[in-house]
Amino acid sequence: MSRLTLAISAAVSSFLFLTLPAWAQEQMPQPSFPHPWQIGLQNPVTPVAVMMHNFHTFLVWVISAISIFVLILLLIVIFRFNEKANPVPAKWSHNTLLEVLWTAIPVLALVIIAVPSYRLLYYMDRTTEAEMTLKITGNQWYWSYEYPDSEVSFDALALMAEEIDLTKGQHRLLETDEHVVLPVDTNIRILFTATDVIHAWTIPAFGVKLDNMPGRINETWTRVTQTGRYYGQCSELCGVDHSNMPIVVDVVTKDAYAQWVAAKKAPAPAAEAAPAEAPAADAPAEAPAAAPTVN
Ligand SMILES: [Cu+2]
């Protein structure tokens, strides 16, 4: 009887343990994955990324206006003041008003760009109301992740081409064995560091790209507003396998995140202990107590 229940519980726990990675790797929507012939940037899914896109659009208008203005000046020079149209050039030089204008207008243009630019820079820096922390360490050539609030940590290594399953919606050079899992609609402080050389953890859809520097901590924050799977890559040349440092982030509901944390913390030692204790133990409750004395 007790053997039967033990066998069932061992089977259930091993089933849970075996299916856990499968759960983590199951297909998810990819709201920001680039499409062939796509124009523009990846879909923004954080407030910072939305502001970046708006700033980018604003800059496109500014540079278009400047380019058209300079083009008009050039065309006037080309057509009105060429040798045929204007055989006798004027002799004057220096014009105070003109010189003030061609100094002041570019300065004004820079100020107009600088104000929203600095507003965005400081907004990206804000981490005062963080609800959780994710620490990312760059290594040659993989990422290490730590969740200090939940005492969860793991490494994420790239999947090689032969391990990629395109039928599961996987992408070559973009998949990892472990995924970063984050809760949706949560202010997340992100800390960046490295153990060897400079790396840069990047998720375009989050508007997050910061250097992982050995010997120091960089900091930013994010708040993802849409669940799904997001991809990024190391964005700082870090050596021969720089291209094999992909990043996969699964953004899930808060409940699913809590489940993931619980599963990540609990089953690994229990599942290892269960088969070892199985022949001897009548009382499963004693198994965890017995394990430390053996060690
Ligand atoms: Cu790198």
Image: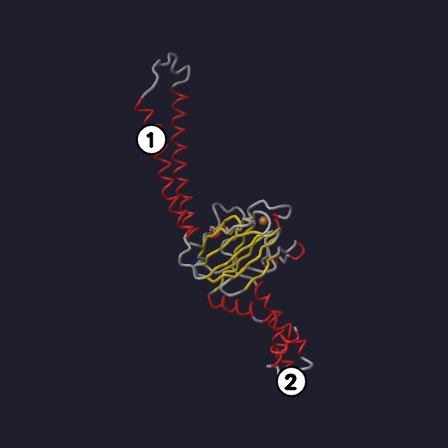
Check the picture and name the quadrant holding the N terminus.
Answer: bottom right
Q: Separation of disc 1 and disc 2 at Cα?
A: 87 Å
Residue 82 x, y percent position in the rendering: 41, 17
Of residue 278 and residue 173, the one placed in the foreground of this image is 278
Residue 111 x, y percent position in the rendering: 35, 38
Quadrant in the rendering for residue 265: bottom right
Say few, some or many: other residues with alpha carbon within 10 Å of mark 2 (under 14 / 14 to 19 / 20 or more): few
Amino acid tagged 2: Asp
Q: Nearer the viewer, mark 1 or mark 2?
A: 2
- The colour mode here is secondary structure
- Label 2's element? loop
What residue is disc 1 on? 104
What residue is disc 2 on? 282
Quadrant in the rendering for residue 87: top left
Of residue 122 and residue 54, the one placed in the foreground of this image is 122
Counting residues from the start of the chain, the first of labels 1 and 2 encountered is 1
